[in-house]
Image (cartoon, helix red, strand yellow):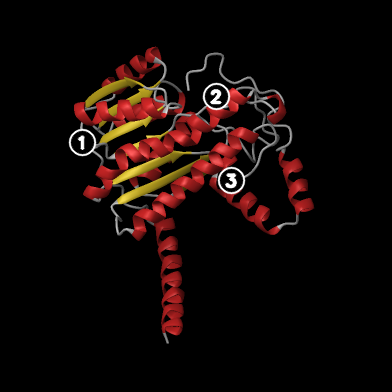
Amino acid sequence: MNFVLETVQVLLLSLWFNIEWLIHLLIPRRKKTIRGEVVLITGAGSGIGRLMAQEFASHQTVLVLWDINQDGLKQTAALAQENGAVRVHSYVCDCSSKNDVYGVADQVKREVGDVSILVNNAGIVTGKKFMDAPDSLIEKTMEVNVMAHFWTYKAFLPAMVANNHGHLVSIASSAGLLGVNGLADYCASKFAAVGFAESIGLEMLAMGKSGVKTTIVCPYFINTGMFDGCQTKWPRLMPILKPEYAIKKIMEAILTDQAYLLMPRSILNIVLYLHSILSTKHGLLLGEYLGAFNMMDHFRGRTKKLE
């Protein structure tokens, strides 16, 4: 009997979720207010981190900015102040070091208080073929792109759980959903970041902590300099994203408690669906058609490593 009842329940809820989805195609989701929230952004000294700091500042939040680059932090802090942040606190932090993350996190909790929105944005990319990448760079990629997420969650998640209030934002990548030639270590780190964030989101629901939200962001290349030199075979189909567009979509996802954000959404959803149902040969053919084998051939990256 339980099987029958639960099956009917699933079918009815599925129907309602489809109706709800159709409704939201016509009526935008209500956005929550984040005024006064304490927002911590890693990798805030440049790129998407800096733009997010400016956007969060416009919502009159208290900003906590982390980066390994002190000059970049100062510039971001000044821009955030200009954009209306209630307060801005900057900390030099090497996110590849667990001890540094824990030490600076303790300082933040003493000087600022509990963080209620955590944005794990810091990231690096070697841009080298796997056999050409030095072990030290591979280790650094994993430490910054995924292990830092473990340590920041350990530091700030307990207060969110205790208050049943908070938001965990993981700036991952479409390379965390599909393998890419020339990005072996980067893909591995982003696959791990996506899996980790998904699992923590499920843990929160299982614990009854529905007030702790998670948002996983998986964009295609964003034109911030981090992937300078990368090419897209069909720009109209898979465009390199403008930072302003990406920030608008990320903030909208956070303010509407969207669990996943893929950019560009339509084409990535189609590619992921085809990837899951096609044979290996068909998948390789699709990858070649989309240029996945050669997009990193002319990678340069940033001239200065600020991320």
> Of 25 and 193, which appears nearest the observer?
193
CA separation in Å, label 3 and label 1: 34 Å
- Look at label 2 and name its amino acid: Met
- Look at label 1 and name its amino acid: Gly
Residue 37: horizontal and vertical position, in percent?
24, 37
Estimate how packed mark 1 is, as few (under 14), some (14 to 19) or many (20 or more) residues with alpha carbons within 10 Å.
some
The residue depicted at 31 percent of the width and 25 percent of the height is: 104
Q: What residue is pinned by disc 2?
A: 226
Side (left or right) of 167 relative to 190: left
Q: Nearer the viewer, mark 3 or mark 1?
A: 3
- Circles 2, 3 touching at the beta carbon (< 8 Å): no
Q: Is disc 2 placed on a helix, strand or loop? A: loop
Q: What residue is pinned by disc 1?
A: 36
For residue 177, which numbered disc appears in the image?
3
> Of 139 and 214, which appears nearest the observer?
139
Residue 190: horizontal and vertical position, in percent?
54, 39
Earlier along the polypeptide chain: callout 1 or callout 2? 1
The residue depicted at 70 percent of the width and 23 percent of the height is: 298
Earlier along the polypeptide chain: callout 2 or callout 3? 3
Earlier along the polypeptide chain: callout 3 or callout 1? 1
> Of 123 and 262, which appears nearest the observer?
123
Q: Is disc 3 placed on a helix, strand or loop? A: loop
Residue 89: horizontal and vertical position, in percent?
26, 23
Count of labels shown? 3
Q: Quarter of the image holding residue 61?
A: top left
Quadrant (top left, top right, bottom left, bottom right) of the N terminus:
bottom left
CA separation in Å, label 1 and label 2: 31 Å
The residue depicted at 36 percent of the width and 43 percent of the height is: 168
- Look at label 3 and name its amino acid: Leu
- Circles 3, 1 touching at the beta carbon (< 8 Å): no
CA separation in Å, label 2 and label 3: 19 Å
Residue 126 visible in the shown view: no
